[in-house]
Image (cartoon, helix red, strand yellow):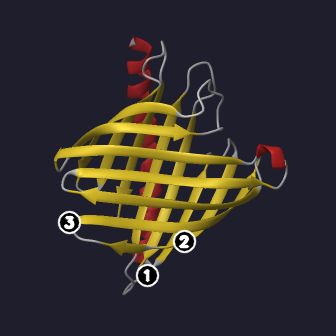
Amino acid sequence: MSAVRSLAFLSIVIVLSGITGLARAAQAFAEEAPGRTWDISASAYAYFVPESRNFIVPTVTADRRWLHLEARYNYEGLDTGSAWVGYNFHVGEKLSLDFTPMVGGVFGRTTGIAPGYRGTLSWWKFELYSEGEYVFDTGDRSASFFYSWSEISLSPVEWFRFGLAAQRTRVYESDRDVQPGFLVGFSYKRVYLTTYAFNPDEDEPTVVVAAGVNY
């Protein structure tokens, strides 16, 4: 587990360095649009996979009322990018749902078209979040695949949360179709940091450290 701790510490340094650049770009975009109401976020997920290549998944989103724009890299596959457009809607108050159906184009090592979604169901201090997509691989139809990431968390205080997570991915090889795990997250103002451990029952779990900022 000492190796895991070392990787987790190193990942924090790497992710925070990367997120600084993304945050500056997001802030510049927001400042260049006076009078417009944009919600912009930038995040980076550092993956530390046992006996495999480590990698980072950066994501930038921009929302203005119903319009959702998003760009990702290394999400659908290594050395692969994707660009998305979606429609935001919100329902409920105490029990609320934010949902965004999307469609995206995938390019790079993997090419294709992908319908997808992201959604958050919130009640009291609980939050259920899920995002998914089905990539129709235009280069190899047999490689078409459903990707998903889900988590349920409890926030006993505003700056701390913990819970369970699960992912289904083909970015790296795994013996499990769906990989379960847990999460622990902290936030301060607009910045957050979350650590995930997938397949915790294995000798070397997959560790993911995520950092992000919201504007």
Residue drawn at x 65%, y 64% as measured from the top left: 104
Q: Residue furthest bottom?
A: 35
Residue at image mark 3? 94
Counting from the top left corner in percent of width and height, residue 193 is at 33, 43
Residue 51, compared with residue 130, is above or below; it is above
Q: Secondary structure at mark 3?
A: loop
Residue at image mark 2? 86
Left or right? Give the position of 154 relative to 130.
Answer: left
Counting from the top left corner in percent of width and height, residue 141 is at 83, 49
Circle on res. 100: none
Pointer 3 or 1: first along the chain: 1
Q: Quadrant of the C terminus?
A: bottom left
Q: Nearer the viewer, residue 116 or 105?
A: 116
Counting from the top left corner in percent of width and height, residue 192 is at 31, 48
Q: Could you give the CA–CA distance between mark 1 and mark 2, rounded to whole angstroms?
A: 20 Å
The amino acid type, in three-letter code, at marker 3 is Lys
Residue at image mark 1? 33
